[in-house]
Amino acid sequence: MMRPMRPLRHRVALAAASLTLLLGLSATPSLAADKTLRIGVQKYGTLVILRERATLEPVLAKLGWTVRWTEFPGGPRCWRR
């Protein structure tokens, strides 16, 4: 039996929580001085929802981080023939 999909807001909240946890675990003194999280997104990815709703920025601002979004037109090229 298939489990029903979670609502979109739950998936976005889970992504935000995961990023926050990842930042907390991987911060080193050299990275902590910059305090800018750079996120690359594609036009039709799920992170676009997080960017458009601006739910990540307030959470990270409380921790002293800023977010810089960069949109990429596509992923890496596949060189296999």
Image (cartoon, grey):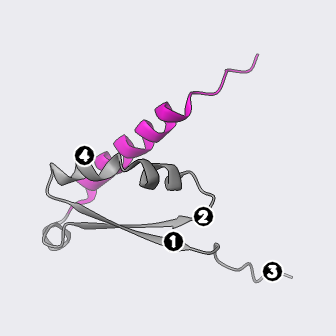
Which residue appears at 67% of the width and 20% of the height? 3
- Name the residue carrying label 2: 43
Mark with earlier residue (2, 1): 2
- Image coordinates of residue 49 in percent, x first then y, are 50, 49
Mark with earlier residue (4, 3): 4
Nearer the observer, disc 3 or disc 2? 2
Q: Give the crowd class for mark 1: few <14, some 14-19, many >=20 residues within 10 Å.
A: few
- Name the residue carrying label 4: 59
Mark with earlier residue (1, 4): 4
Q: Disc 1 on helix, strand or loop?
A: strand
Which of the 4 image quadrants contains residue 27? bottom left
Give the CA separation, mark 4 to mark 3: 41 Å
The amino acid type of the residue labelled 1 equals: Glu
- Name the residue carrying label 1: 71
- Image coordinates of residue 54 in percent, x first then y, are 36, 50
Mark with earlier residue (4, 2): 2
